[in-house]
Amino acid sequence: MDNGSLGLLGDANTSLQIELQSCTTVRNQASRIFLYASLSVGIACTVVGNFLVVLSIAYFKQLQSPTNSFVMSLAVADCLVGLVVMPYSMIRTVEGCWYFGALFCQLHSSLDVMLCTASIFHLSCIAFDRYYAVCNPLVYSLKMSRSRVALLIVVCWAVPMLISFGPIMLDLHIAGVDILLPKDVCVFLVNRIYAVMASMVAFYLPMAIMLVAYWKIFKAAKRQAKQISAMESQMAAGVGKDSSKKQRHRNTMRRERKAAKTLGIIMGVFLIFWMPFFTVNIVDPFIEYSTEVVVWDIFLWLGYINSSLNPFLYGFFNRSFRRAFLIQKMFNTLFNFCVVVFQTKC
């Protein structure tokens, strides 16, 4: 999600037409090299990590499930963030200037809003999918059929496109904002209406869906842990009752802690990396665009980092992914062993 700040309007009235000065590079050579190196590593991790997720799901048939369809589409969105959005944002952040023209500034802002919003939409769809898988397993195959999964994925791409390219390319997002920007500055200014509406659709609504879904999943996991514990106690009835009771309690607590930890990490990462940006995104137009540029840059790159972490949270740390890689590793080992044996016999 792209944004910038004037950081120099103070108490100026936005009804007056204001013209910003051309950009100037304020960082020294050492800090620029450090920033380029650090941000380039982040971009590389985002692209490579998400590309590996896409490749894994496309290659391993056992990973081609409804949930992983969302994960694959999420990885495509995050990979595109790393390929077409982050490199230009890096140059703008480090240099303080925009070298690619006004038209490409609009296109870059549109892609930024669309791809980051699509990524967030996919996260809410994954939460919705897991809610049905855990809380309503008997109707899961009916509710999350291939056609419905495909429809949800289309929505995850279509709605972000509507709230990005339409308003931005038609300049509807700056209606009523009388600020003239020089050609070498790419600041994504938004009026109050667009700031509130876009933030609600792109972040706060998906956040509410994720919070409700994961809270219900946590309660269901807690209930299932107690049911499993009760079954274990029945199986162990009459054999070491005291020790069995203690072990049952430990197992229940272990399952509850694991469920809470997993869901807490997923929601915690999402909120930590995106909440600051969208909070300031709403507040900034109401305080006459006085948020400092460095604050916008920090919050913007925090959101980008979320795209580099998604492959690990929703892909590589997933049990089915690890199992698929283990099966492939065993198959390759067996294949290599057979080749060696065959060559030896020959």
Image: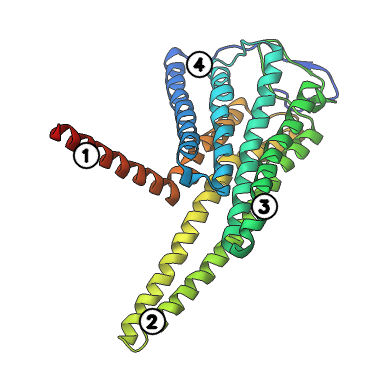
Residue 164 visible in rendering: yes
> What residue did someone put label 1 on?
337
Q: Secondary structure at mark 2?
A: helix
> What residue did someone put label 4 on?
27
Q: Secondary structure at mark 4?
A: loop
Residue 170, placed above or below residue 72: above
Marks 4 and 1, Cα distance to the nearest angstrom?
Answer: 57 Å
* Dot 2 or dot 3, earlier in sequence: 3
Quarter assignment of residue 283: top right
Q: Secondary structure at mark 1?
A: helix
| Tag in front: 3 or 1 | 1
Marks 2 and 4, Cα distance to the nearest angstrom?
Answer: 69 Å
| Tag in front: 2 or 1 | 1
Image point 60% across, 13% down: which residue? 97
Compared across the picture, whether 239 is left or right of 266 comes to left
Q: Tell me if label 4 and label 1 are in contact, CB under 8 Å.
A: no
| Tag in front: 2 or 4 | 2
**Label 4 environment density (alpha carbons within 10 Å; few <14, some 14–19, many ≥20):** few
Residue 5 visible in rendering: no
* Residue 344, x across and y down, in percent: 13, 34
> What residue did someone put label 2 on?
235
* Residue 246, x across and y down, in percent: 35, 79
Marks 4 and 3, Cα distance to the nearest angstrom?
Answer: 41 Å
* Dot 4 or dot 1, earlier in sequence: 4
**Label 1 environment density (alpha carbons within 10 Å; few <14, some 14–19, many ≥20):** few
* Dot 2 or dot 4, earlier in sequence: 4
Marks 2 and 3, Cα distance to the nearest angstrom?
Answer: 39 Å
Marks 2 and 1, Cα distance to the nearest angstrom?
Answer: 43 Å
Which label number is shown at residue 209? 3
